[in-house]
Amino acid sequence: MLSLEQEFHHIIDGQKPDNLYNPILYILEQPGKRIRPQLVNMSVNMFEGSTEQAKKVAMAFEMLHNFTLIHDDIMDEAPIRRGKDTVYKKWNSNIAILSGDALAIMALQQLLDLKCDEKVILAISNVFAQTSLEICEGQQYDLDFETQEKVSIDEYINMIRKKTAVMFAGCLKAGAILAQASQQDQQTLYDFGIHLGIAFQLADDVLDVYASAPVFGKAIGGDIRDNKKTYLYLKALEDANPAQKETLESLFSTQTSDFEKKYNIVRGIYDELNIKTKTEELEQHYLNLCMSDLEKINVSEDKKEPFNAIVQKMINREK
Amino acid sequence: MLSLEQEFHHIIDGQKPDNLYNPILYILEQPGKRIRPQLVNMSVNMFEGSTEQAKKVAMAFEMLHNFTLIHDDIMDEAPIRRGKDTVYKKWNSNIAILSGDALAIMALQQLLDLKCDEKVILAISNVFAQTSLEICEGQQYDLDFETQEKVSIDEYINMIRKKTAVMFAGCLKAGAILAQASQQDQQTLYDFGIHLGIAFQLADDVLDVYASAPVFGKAIGGDIRDNKKTYLYLKALEDANPAQKETLESLFSTQTSDFEKKYNIVRGIYDELNIKTKTEELEQHYLNLCMSDLEKINVSEDKKEPFNAIVQKMINREK
């Protein structure tokens, strides 16, 4: 069986015009973490569905994910991703907008091309569409929060649920639908995905401040540079003394030219308030919810093993 | 039955976040020409399909069309459309990227929500996806041509086929599928749409130079400003004497600050070479092809009347 990269290469290589398809091939061939295909496969295997069809669903969601990356990187003005130039940097914004659009459509085409019951294809396509729309909502909230004065921790968790977690949940649910799991198991796996996704994003927020850049593959401190109100920032505001609060609010309300200085002050306050540990505690809370979800699913213990493993891996995540 | 505007209002009004959905409502509620819904309806009526389901398909394609407008206007830096600010001008580019993305997904959701045979839904969704992808290809060729030194008239016609005509064709084919027309009639209507769409775009190119701005609803001369190699330009190059050719090529190879002057010189050369008439002759050629397509379709003459009418209307188009 061909690898995911080979499949991507197969369907995209040689398509014209080059300026539309080369950026798509460029981003899909980068060795990413491939968490979303992995989630699809885990879910299909749990209920013993078709591996061949699973691959198409996995490709669809990985393509959808990369579509969001291409467009998000324009909006966030992110120059580097996975240690390489982002699409809009390597080409330009117009090409990035259009390649992203094309990639989202090609993702859908993978699903429409599934060889299985039409009802199953439509159900998976519905999950795909709903997931995509909620991701757009999440990204818009994320942009809104940059200039919105007050953001509550609840609003933040809702934002990352949409921006990150629904994709994890959608992958798992789509796999469960393909493998004809019960409605209840589909929903429980969806919940597992939401909890895992929120934990994943919290870990990402920590890594943005505390990771080693070469391992992380992105520039460090991007969230601080962009005044992103992450859980770290919001929790710090909650726990800060008046002086710390004033410093944080002031630094996060303007564009600074001296990023190095801003980063060091903010990280200093986070350290004083023990924000890294507090964020990891909330992450652990969501991973515990994952474990409870898993208990509810009606399959043998050995089928659950990959799910336990991914939760464990999340705890030790470094990138 | 609710109007298209009422249906759009119904599904979008009140959705959150505002910055994602307000731009969508803004563009959908503008009184556009609604040619694409009209094409869907014409095709469904020709084969006596369901009016209620036709509306959903019509909405899907009108939404898809508006998604392309939102993104194209960013890329083309077009400030005005239908006499109003474009989305990226009224909000900003990031919001325009994201609202466009969301609108494309909502378009798909209209189709997935159809109440009819699953095979029909999948067939229409396939047309929708293929159409969307070809439109992206067409737009990329359009952008490429701005900086590409030599563009042939054949390349140009292929570009507008993808950028404009496949949408017309897709609307007609989707309607025919919904109404369960024969495969052959589906294909013939598709061809009719291609020929109509190419004629439509040629008329649009003429209007860009020769229309009255208040009627057209867009700024006049945008193609000249952006160095777009339209049929008018390519035909003028073909027919020009060496001096005219040099002037045209020189004006279309740089960004000029004096748009007024550039426009007047280019239009002057077009007039000397009778380019407006020559373009209208090619438009007429494609409209003649439409009439031959129509003859092949196996329905009574009265069912073809709206198709004859739209071809006639195209000949007298002013916006």
Image (cartoon, coloured by chain):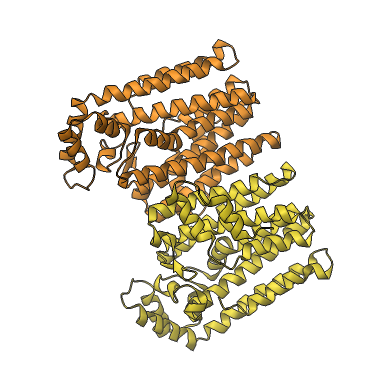
Chain colours: A yellow, B orange
Residue B9 visible, this orientation: no
Q: Quadrant of residue A279?
A: bottom right
Q: Residue furthest bottom?
A: A272
Q: Residue furthest front?
A: B242
Q: Position of residue A292 (x, y in %)?
A: 75, 71
Q: Nearer the viewer, residue A261 or B183?
A: B183
Q: Residue furthest right?
A: A300
Q: Position of residue A98 (x, y in %)?
A: 44, 50
Residue at (73, 73) in percent of width and height: A308
Q: Position of residue B179 (x, y in %)?
A: 63, 26
Name the quadrant of the C terminus of chain B. top left
Q: Nearer the viewer, residue A29 or B204?
A: A29
Q: Nearer the viewer, residue B93 or A147?
A: B93
| Left or right for A174, reference B19 | right
Q: Quadrant of residue A38?
A: bottom right
Q: Position of residue B196 (x, y in %)?
A: 44, 25
Residue at (54, 59) in percent of width and height: A28
Q: Nearer the viewer, residue B233 or A76?
A: B233
Q: Is residue A73 above or below residue A209?
A: above
Residue at (54, 70) in percent of width and height: A153
Q: Is residue A244 above or below residue B138?
A: below
